[in-house]
Amino acid sequence: MPADTTPGAAAATASLAGIQNVPGVPKPDPILVGSSISRSFGGLKAVDVEHLEVQRGVITALIGPNGAGKTTLFNLLTGFDVPDSGQWQLNGKPLHKVPAYKVARRGMVRTFQLTKVLSKLTVMENMRLGATGQRGEKFWSAPFRSLWKTQEDEITTRAEDLLTRFKLDAKSEDFAGSLSGGQRKLLEMARALMVDPELIMLDEPMAGVNPALKQSLLGHVKSLRDEGRTVLFVEHDMDMVRDISDWVVVMAQGTIVAEGTPQQVMADQAVIDAYLGTHHDTDISEADETEVEAAADAELDQEADRG
Protein backbone atom coordinates (compact mmCIF):
# COMPACT_ATOMS: atom_id res chain seq x y z
CA MET A 1 0.00 0.00 0.00
CA PRO A 2 1.15 3.60 -0.44
CA ALA A 3 3.12 5.11 2.39
CA ASP A 4 0.22 7.29 3.55
CA THR A 5 -0.85 7.68 7.17
CA THR A 6 -4.12 9.58 6.70
CA PRO A 7 -7.32 8.09 8.16
CA GLY A 8 -8.65 7.56 4.64
CA ALA A 9 -5.56 5.58 3.66
CA ALA A 10 -5.76 3.47 6.80
CA ALA A 11 -9.43 2.68 6.16
CA ALA A 12 -8.64 1.80 2.53
CA THR A 13 -5.86 -0.56 3.60
CA ALA A 14 -8.19 -2.28 6.06
CA SER A 15 -11.00 -2.63 3.51
CA LEU A 16 -8.71 -4.35 1.01
CA ALA A 17 -7.00 -6.69 3.44
CA GLY A 18 -7.05 -10.33 2.34
CA ILE A 19 -8.42 -9.72 -1.16
CA GLN A 20 -6.90 -11.99 -3.80
CA ASN A 21 -5.00 -10.30 -6.61
CA VAL A 22 -6.87 -11.96 -9.48
CA PRO A 23 -8.86 -10.33 -12.31
CA GLY A 24 -12.50 -9.63 -11.43
CA VAL A 25 -12.05 -10.48 -7.76
CA PRO A 26 -15.14 -9.70 -5.59
CA LYS A 27 -14.75 -6.81 -3.13
CA PRO A 28 -16.17 -6.61 0.41
CA ASP A 29 -18.13 -3.40 -0.27
CA PRO A 30 -18.19 -2.55 -3.99
CA ILE A 31 -19.71 0.75 -5.07
CA LEU A 32 -19.53 -0.15 -8.78
CA VAL A 33 -20.06 -3.62 -10.25
CA GLY A 34 -19.97 -4.48 -13.95
CA SER A 35 -20.28 -7.74 -15.88
CA SER A 36 -19.88 -8.86 -19.52
CA ILE A 37 -19.18 -5.33 -20.80
CA SER A 38 -18.11 -5.28 -24.44
CA ARG A 39 -17.67 -2.67 -27.15
CA SER A 40 -16.42 -3.18 -30.70
CA PHE A 41 -15.48 -0.71 -33.41
CA GLY A 42 -15.68 -2.50 -36.73
CA GLY A 43 -13.59 -5.64 -36.35
CA LEU A 44 -11.75 -4.35 -33.27
CA LYS A 45 -13.04 -5.37 -29.84
CA ALA A 46 -11.99 -2.36 -27.75
CA VAL A 47 -13.53 -3.57 -24.45
CA ASP A 48 -14.27 -7.10 -23.32
CA VAL A 49 -14.55 -6.98 -19.51
CA GLU A 50 -15.94 -10.14 -17.93
CA HIS A 51 -16.27 -8.74 -14.39
CA LEU A 52 -15.15 -5.62 -12.52
CA GLU A 53 -15.79 -4.43 -8.98
CA VAL A 54 -14.59 -1.12 -7.52
CA GLN A 55 -14.24 -1.04 -3.74
CA ARG A 56 -15.95 1.82 -1.93
CA GLY A 57 -13.80 4.49 -0.27
CA VAL A 58 -10.49 3.68 -1.96
CA ILE A 59 -8.39 5.03 -4.81
CA THR A 60 -8.33 2.53 -7.67
CA ALA A 61 -6.00 3.03 -10.65
CA LEU A 62 -6.91 1.69 -14.08
CA ILE A 63 -3.70 1.20 -16.02
CA GLY A 64 -2.58 -0.43 -19.25
CA PRO A 65 -0.70 0.29 -22.47
CA ASN A 66 -2.05 2.67 -25.09
CA GLY A 67 -5.09 1.17 -26.83
CA ALA A 68 -5.92 -1.12 -23.91
CA GLY A 69 -9.52 0.20 -23.77
CA LYS A 70 -9.33 2.23 -20.56
CA THR A 71 -10.98 5.43 -21.79
CA THR A 72 -13.56 3.45 -23.78
CA LEU A 73 -14.51 1.62 -20.59
CA PHE A 74 -14.81 4.98 -18.81
CA ASN A 75 -17.07 6.24 -21.60
CA LEU A 76 -19.30 3.18 -21.32
CA LEU A 77 -19.62 3.28 -17.53
CA THR A 78 -20.48 7.00 -17.49
CA GLY A 79 -23.02 6.99 -20.33
CA PHE A 80 -20.89 8.72 -22.96
CA ASP A 81 -20.91 5.60 -25.14
CA VAL A 82 -23.23 2.63 -25.56
CA PRO A 83 -21.91 -0.94 -25.14
CA ASP A 84 -22.64 -3.89 -27.39
CA SER A 85 -23.43 -5.89 -24.26
CA GLY A 86 -23.07 -5.73 -20.51
CA GLN A 87 -24.60 -4.56 -17.25
CA TRP A 88 -23.25 -2.42 -14.42
CA GLN A 89 -24.65 -0.96 -11.21
CA LEU A 90 -23.80 1.92 -8.89
CA ASN A 91 -24.85 1.15 -5.32
CA GLY A 92 -26.87 -1.73 -6.69
CA LYS A 93 -28.87 0.44 -9.12
CA PRO A 94 -28.45 -0.34 -12.83
CA LEU A 95 -26.81 2.26 -15.08
CA HIS A 96 -27.07 0.46 -18.40
CA LYS A 97 -28.60 2.83 -21.01
CA VAL A 98 -28.73 5.67 -18.45
CA PRO A 99 -27.65 8.97 -20.11
CA ALA A 100 -24.54 10.74 -18.86
CA TYR A 101 -26.33 13.59 -17.08
CA LYS A 102 -28.45 11.14 -15.09
CA VAL A 103 -25.36 9.08 -14.21
CA ALA A 104 -23.86 12.26 -12.71
CA ARG A 105 -27.04 12.95 -10.75
CA ARG A 106 -26.83 9.47 -9.27
CA GLY A 107 -23.42 10.24 -7.82
CA MET A 108 -20.85 9.14 -10.42
CA VAL A 109 -19.02 11.94 -12.22
CA ARG A 110 -15.96 12.03 -14.45
CA THR A 111 -13.30 14.32 -15.82
CA PHE A 112 -11.69 14.05 -19.23
CA GLN A 113 -8.16 13.62 -20.51
CA LEU A 114 -8.79 16.66 -22.72
CA THR A 115 -10.47 19.13 -20.40
CA LYS A 116 -14.06 20.12 -21.12
CA VAL A 117 -14.22 23.57 -19.52
CA LEU A 118 -16.48 26.16 -21.14
CA SER A 119 -13.77 28.57 -22.20
CA LYS A 120 -16.03 31.59 -22.88
CA LEU A 121 -17.62 31.46 -19.44
CA THR A 122 -15.89 32.57 -16.28
CA VAL A 123 -14.46 30.11 -13.79
CA MET A 124 -17.33 30.86 -11.40
CA GLU A 125 -19.93 30.36 -14.14
CA ASN A 126 -18.35 26.99 -14.95
CA MET A 127 -18.67 26.04 -11.30
CA ARG A 128 -22.31 27.10 -11.02
CA LEU A 129 -23.19 25.01 -14.08
CA GLY A 130 -21.84 21.95 -12.28
CA ALA A 131 -24.58 22.06 -9.65
CA THR A 132 -27.67 19.93 -10.29
CA GLY A 133 -31.34 20.46 -9.50
CA GLN A 134 -31.26 24.22 -10.00
CA ARG A 135 -34.74 25.72 -9.82
CA GLY A 136 -33.67 28.70 -11.93
CA GLU A 137 -33.12 26.39 -14.89
CA LYS A 138 -36.77 25.33 -15.04
CA PHE A 139 -39.01 27.04 -17.55
CA TRP A 140 -41.85 27.84 -15.15
CA SER A 141 -39.67 29.30 -12.38
CA ALA A 142 -36.88 31.03 -14.37
CA PRO A 143 -38.74 34.39 -14.67
CA PHE A 144 -39.30 34.60 -10.89
CA ARG A 145 -35.92 35.21 -9.27
CA SER A 146 -37.39 35.14 -5.78
CA LEU A 147 -38.07 31.40 -6.24
CA TRP A 148 -34.44 30.46 -6.85
CA LYS A 149 -32.24 33.29 -5.49
CA THR A 150 -31.62 31.59 -2.13
CA GLN A 151 -30.58 28.36 -3.84
CA GLU A 152 -28.30 30.24 -6.25
CA ASP A 153 -26.62 32.00 -3.32
CA GLU A 154 -26.01 28.62 -1.67
CA ILE A 155 -24.55 27.27 -4.93
CA THR A 156 -22.28 30.31 -5.25
CA THR A 157 -21.04 29.89 -1.67
CA ARG A 158 -20.27 26.23 -2.29
CA ALA A 159 -18.45 27.15 -5.54
CA GLU A 160 -16.39 29.79 -3.72
CA ASP A 161 -15.39 27.28 -1.04
CA LEU A 162 -14.28 24.74 -3.66
CA LEU A 163 -12.35 27.33 -5.67
CA THR A 164 -10.54 28.34 -2.49
CA ARG A 165 -9.75 24.70 -1.74
CA PHE A 166 -8.33 24.21 -5.24
CA LYS A 167 -6.50 27.56 -5.12
CA LEU A 168 -8.51 29.00 -8.00
CA ASP A 169 -10.37 31.67 -6.03
CA ALA A 170 -8.20 34.44 -7.50
CA LYS A 171 -9.28 33.29 -10.97
CA SER A 172 -13.03 33.11 -10.29
CA GLU A 173 -13.94 36.01 -12.60
CA ASP A 174 -11.42 35.10 -15.32
CA PHE A 175 -12.55 33.31 -18.45
CA ALA A 176 -11.93 29.57 -18.14
CA GLY A 177 -10.18 29.67 -21.53
CA SER A 178 -7.40 31.80 -20.00
CA LEU A 179 -6.39 29.09 -17.52
CA SER A 180 -3.31 26.93 -17.95
CA GLY A 181 -3.70 23.22 -18.67
CA GLY A 182 -3.07 22.33 -15.05
CA GLN A 183 -5.53 24.93 -13.79
CA ARG A 184 -8.18 23.55 -16.14
CA LYS A 185 -7.63 20.12 -14.60
CA LEU A 186 -8.16 21.66 -11.17
CA LEU A 187 -11.30 23.42 -12.38
CA GLU A 188 -12.73 20.19 -13.79
CA MET A 189 -12.10 18.39 -10.51
CA ALA A 190 -13.62 21.26 -8.49
CA ARG A 191 -16.65 21.45 -10.81
CA ALA A 192 -17.18 17.69 -10.47
CA LEU A 193 -17.48 18.14 -6.70
CA MET A 194 -20.38 20.56 -7.17
CA VAL A 195 -22.50 17.43 -7.66
CA ASP A 196 -21.28 16.05 -4.30
CA PRO A 197 -20.51 12.68 -5.94
CA GLU A 198 -19.77 9.36 -4.28
CA LEU A 199 -17.57 8.09 -7.12
CA ILE A 200 -15.20 10.34 -9.09
CA MET A 201 -13.61 9.02 -12.28
CA LEU A 202 -10.51 10.86 -13.47
CA ASP A 203 -9.19 10.23 -16.99
CA GLU A 204 -5.43 10.88 -16.94
CA PRO A 205 -5.57 13.74 -14.41
CA MET A 206 -1.82 14.37 -14.71
CA ALA A 207 -1.62 14.53 -18.52
CA GLY A 208 -0.10 17.83 -19.63
CA VAL A 209 0.28 19.14 -16.08
CA ASN A 210 3.51 20.89 -15.11
CA PRO A 211 5.46 19.51 -12.11
CA ALA A 212 4.50 22.44 -9.89
CA LEU A 213 0.78 21.63 -10.16
CA LYS A 214 1.21 17.85 -10.23
CA GLN A 215 1.87 17.62 -6.49
CA SER A 216 -1.16 19.81 -5.84
CA LEU A 217 -3.36 17.51 -7.91
CA LEU A 218 -1.99 14.45 -6.12
CA GLY A 219 -2.91 16.00 -2.80
CA HIS A 220 -6.42 16.77 -3.99
CA VAL A 221 -6.98 13.20 -5.19
CA LYS A 222 -5.89 11.87 -1.79
CA SER A 223 -8.19 14.35 -0.05
CA LEU A 224 -11.16 12.94 -1.97
CA ARG A 225 -10.53 9.54 -0.42
CA ASP A 226 -10.07 11.12 3.02
CA GLU A 227 -13.56 12.61 2.66
CA GLY A 228 -14.96 9.11 2.13
CA ARG A 229 -15.34 9.35 -1.64
CA THR A 230 -14.29 6.66 -4.09
CA VAL A 231 -11.81 7.47 -6.88
CA LEU A 232 -11.23 5.51 -10.09
CA PHE A 233 -8.58 7.00 -12.34
CA VAL A 234 -6.77 6.23 -15.57
CA GLU A 235 -3.07 7.00 -15.52
CA HIS A 236 0.20 6.20 -17.33
CA ASP A 237 2.51 7.72 -14.71
CA MET A 238 3.57 4.68 -12.68
CA ASP A 239 5.17 6.82 -9.97
CA MET A 240 1.79 8.44 -9.39
CA VAL A 241 0.06 5.06 -9.39
CA ARG A 242 2.44 3.76 -6.73
CA ASP A 243 2.11 6.96 -4.71
CA ILE A 244 -1.65 7.36 -4.36
CA SER A 245 -3.49 4.21 -5.44
CA ASP A 246 -4.74 1.60 -2.97
CA TRP A 247 -5.73 -0.89 -5.66
CA VAL A 248 -4.76 -1.28 -9.32
CA VAL A 249 -6.70 -2.81 -12.22
CA VAL A 250 -4.69 -3.61 -15.36
CA MET A 251 -6.21 -3.73 -18.85
CA ALA A 252 -4.62 -5.06 -22.03
CA GLN A 253 -6.34 -5.51 -25.40
CA GLY A 254 -9.71 -4.66 -23.88
CA THR A 255 -9.64 -7.21 -21.06
CA ILE A 256 -8.67 -7.08 -17.39
CA VAL A 257 -5.47 -9.09 -17.01
CA ALA A 258 -4.52 -8.34 -13.40
CA GLU A 259 -5.65 -6.71 -10.16
CA GLY A 260 -3.96 -6.08 -6.84
CA THR A 261 -2.07 -3.60 -4.72
CA PRO A 262 0.51 -1.47 -6.58
CA GLN A 263 3.31 -3.71 -5.33
CA GLN A 264 1.51 -6.87 -6.43
CA VAL A 265 0.67 -5.72 -9.95
CA MET A 266 4.13 -4.29 -10.62
CA ALA A 267 5.53 -7.77 -9.97
CA ASP A 268 2.77 -9.60 -11.88
CA GLN A 269 4.01 -11.39 -15.02
CA ALA A 270 0.76 -10.60 -16.87
CA VAL A 271 1.39 -6.89 -16.29
CA ILE A 272 5.01 -7.12 -17.39
CA ASP A 273 3.90 -8.96 -20.53
CA ALA A 274 1.18 -6.38 -21.26
CA TYR A 275 3.63 -3.49 -21.14
CA LEU A 276 6.77 -5.09 -22.54
CA GLY A 277 5.56 -7.99 -24.70
CA THR A 278 5.36 -11.65 -23.81
CA HIS A 279 8.86 -12.44 -25.06
CA HIS A 280 10.73 -9.51 -23.58
CA ASP A 281 12.63 -11.73 -21.12
CA THR A 282 13.44 -14.60 -23.50
CA ASP A 283 17.14 -15.42 -23.56
CA ILE A 284 18.78 -15.12 -26.97
CA SER A 285 21.27 -17.79 -28.00
CA GLU A 286 24.79 -16.95 -29.12
CA ALA A 287 23.97 -18.14 -32.66
CA ASP A 288 20.85 -15.95 -32.78
CA GLU A 289 22.83 -12.98 -31.51
CA THR A 290 25.47 -13.51 -34.22
CA GLU A 291 22.75 -13.71 -36.87
CA VAL A 292 21.14 -10.46 -35.68
CA GLU A 293 24.50 -8.66 -35.66
CA ALA A 294 25.31 -9.93 -39.16
CA ALA A 295 21.96 -8.73 -40.50
CA ALA A 296 22.49 -5.33 -38.91
CA ASP A 297 26.01 -5.05 -40.40
CA ALA A 298 24.69 -6.01 -43.86
CA GLU A 299 22.01 -3.31 -43.64
CA LEU A 300 24.62 -0.72 -42.69
CA ASP A 301 26.80 -1.77 -45.65
CA GLN A 302 23.84 -1.38 -48.02
CA GLU A 303 23.13 2.09 -46.64
CA ALA A 304 26.79 3.04 -47.19
CA ASP A 305 26.74 1.76 -50.80
CA ARG A 306 23.59 3.77 -51.54
CA GLY A 307 25.20 6.87 -50.04
Image (cartoon, helix red, strand yellow):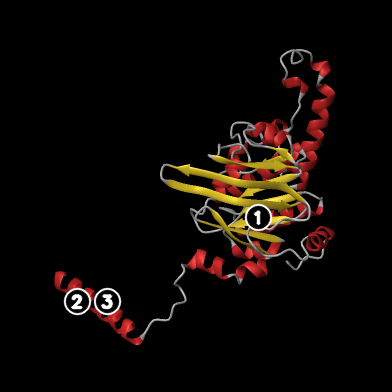
Amino acid at pointer 2: Asp
Q: Nearer the viewer, residue 107 or 92?
A: 92
Q: Nearer the viewer, mark 3 or mark 2?
A: 3
Label 2 to label 1: alpha-carbon separation: 50 Å
- As helix, strand or loop, the secondary structure at mark 3 comes to helix
Asked if 45 appears above or below 96 in the picture, the reply is below
Q: Tag on residue 213?
A: 1
Q: Tag on residue 296?
A: 3
Graded by Cα atoms within 10 Å as few (under 14), some (14 to 19) or many (20 or more), the crowding at tag 2 reads few
Label 3 to label 1: alpha-carbon separation: 45 Å
Amino acid at pointer 3: Ala
Q: Answer with the quarter of the image where residue 242 lies.
A: bottom right
Q: Nearer the viewer, mark 2 or mark 1?
A: 2
Considering the image in quadrants, where does the C terminus appear? bottom left
State if disc 1 and disc 3 touch (CB < 8 Å): no
Residue lying at the far left of the rendered structure: 305
